[in-house]
Amino acid sequence: MFQQQAAAPADIAVNPGPSDTPQCLAWSPVANTLAVGSWDSTIKAYEISPTGQTQPRQEFKLGGPVLGTTFVADGSKLVSAGADKTVQLCDLASGQMQQVGAHDAPVKTVTYINSLSCIMTGSWDKTLKFWDLRSPQPVSTQALSERCYAADAVGNLAAVATADKKISMYTLQGGPTPFKQVETSLKMQTRCVSVFPTGDGLAVGSIEGRVAIHYADPTRAAKDNFSFKCHRDNKNIYCVNDIGFHPAYGTFATVGSDGIFTFWDKENRNRLKSFPKSQAQITCCGFNGDGSLFAYGIGYDWSKGHEGYNANSPKGIFVHGVTDEEVRPRPDKKK
C-alpha cells in the first residue's frame, strides 16, 4: 500500500534531557517552546530556535510520572496529567504550580479545548472530565466504557481510546456531547490516537504495528476508513507509540518501539519517508505550530516488560528539521 523512500540525516539532541524516559511532549501554539513530560516526574520546557538549537526555560517537579501535557491557548502555561492522579497548571513565567483537577486513578491524557477554553482529561478511573481552569470542579464528566488509554481533540471533535479497543467520539460545540462509539479495526491494545487537523476523523495506533484511519462522518467512513501495517521487520512486530499530524499538510508521523519514525500521506496512501533507527525506542512525538520542526522522545517504553528494562539505556529528546519534500502529500504516479 505504501512506497518507502530514503532516510534522513541525524537530528539535534535537546539538552539537558530528562533523567528517565520521556512519556509525552507538546509544542506551544504561539512559539517554538517545547514541553516534555517524563517518568522522572518532571516537565521540562525548552526554547527551540528555527534551526533546532535548544535553550532550557523552566522545569516543574510533580508528584509522580508525567503521562500527558499540553499548553493553554496563549502558551503562557502548561497543564499536566500525572500518575499521582492530579491535574496541575504550570506557569512558565513564575515557575509556580497549581492543582486544577483530579481523578480517582492516574490521569493518562490532557488536552486543551480551544473552542471551549477548557481542558479535557482522561483517566484510568474510566472517566473523561472537562475543566474550567478557574474552578476546582469539572464542568462536565463523561463515563467511559473502560480505562482511557489515549485522547485528542481538534475543532469540534474529541476522540478517546479505551482499554476495550473502542473509540468514543464527542462533539464539542455548545459543550461535550457523545457522538458515537466505534470499535477499531485493530485487533490488539490501542496505544495512541490523534485527530486530523481538519477535525473530521482520527488515526489510531496499536501494539500490533498497525494504524487505522477513521472518519467521523458515517458516509465517508464507509468508503474511506482503512488500516495499514507499519513498524515491522522480517522477524518482529513493534508498538506504534504515538502519532502526530503535520499542521499544514495533514500528513502524519508515526513512532514506534523499533526506534524508527516515519512520515505518511493518508489521502494518497503513501509512505513519504522512513528515518534511521534511533538509539532506543521512540515513545512520543509532535510537529511544532508551522510544521518546520518535529520533536520526538526516546527511551524504554516497557513493550518488553520488566525483563527488557535497562537503567543505562539511552533516553532523551531530539528535534528534526522538517523539509517540505518530506511532508508534502505525494500522489502515487501509478494510480
Image: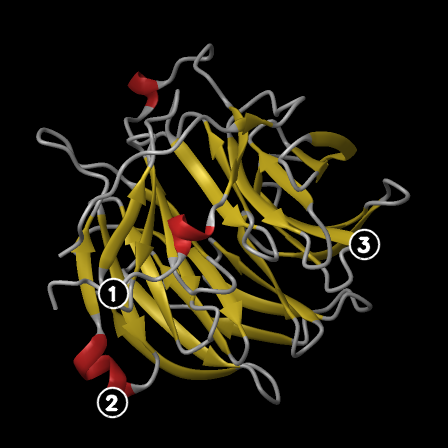
Query: On the picture, is 263 further left or further right than 270?
Result: right
**Residue drawn 49% across and 57% down?**
125
Q: Quadrant of the N terminus?
A: bottom left
Q: CA distance from mark 2 to mark 3?
A: 40 Å
Q: Earlier in the sequence, mark 2 or mark 3?
A: 3
**At label 2, which amino acid type do we have?**
Thr
Regarding residue 62, the answer to whether it shows in the image is no
Dot 3 falls on a residue whose secondary structure is: loop
Regarding residue 204, the answer to whether it shows in the image is yes
**Counting other residues with Cα less than 10 Å from the Cα at mark 2, is it few (<14), some (14-19), or many (20 or more)?**
few
Q: Quadrant of the C terminus?
A: bottom left
**Residue drawn 9% across and 28% down?**
235
Residue 155 location (% of width, % of height): 55, 77
Q: Determine whether label 2 and label 1 are within 8 Å by CB.
A: no
**At label 1, which amino acid type do we have?**
Pro
> Which quadrant of the figure has residue 293?
top right
**Counting other residues with Cα less than 10 Å from the Cα at mark 3, is it few (<14), some (14-19), or many (20 or more)?**
some
Dot 1 falls on a residue whose secondary structure is: loop
Q: Determine whether label 3 and label 1 are within 8 Å by CB.
A: no
Residue 153: give its label.
none
Mark 2 vs mark 1, foreground winner is 1
Residue 76: give its label.
3
Q: CA distance from mark 3 to mark 1?
A: 39 Å
Residue 247 location (% of width, % of height): 52, 62
Mark 3 vs mark 1, foreground winner is 1
Q: Determine whether 181 is above or below 237 in the image.
A: below
Residue 219: give its label.
2
**At label 3, which amino acid type do we have?**
Ser
Q: Earlier in the sequence, mark 3 or mark 1?
A: 3
> Which quadrant of the figure has residue 217?
bottom left
Q: Which residue is mark 1?
A: 331
185 or 164, which lies in front?
A: 185
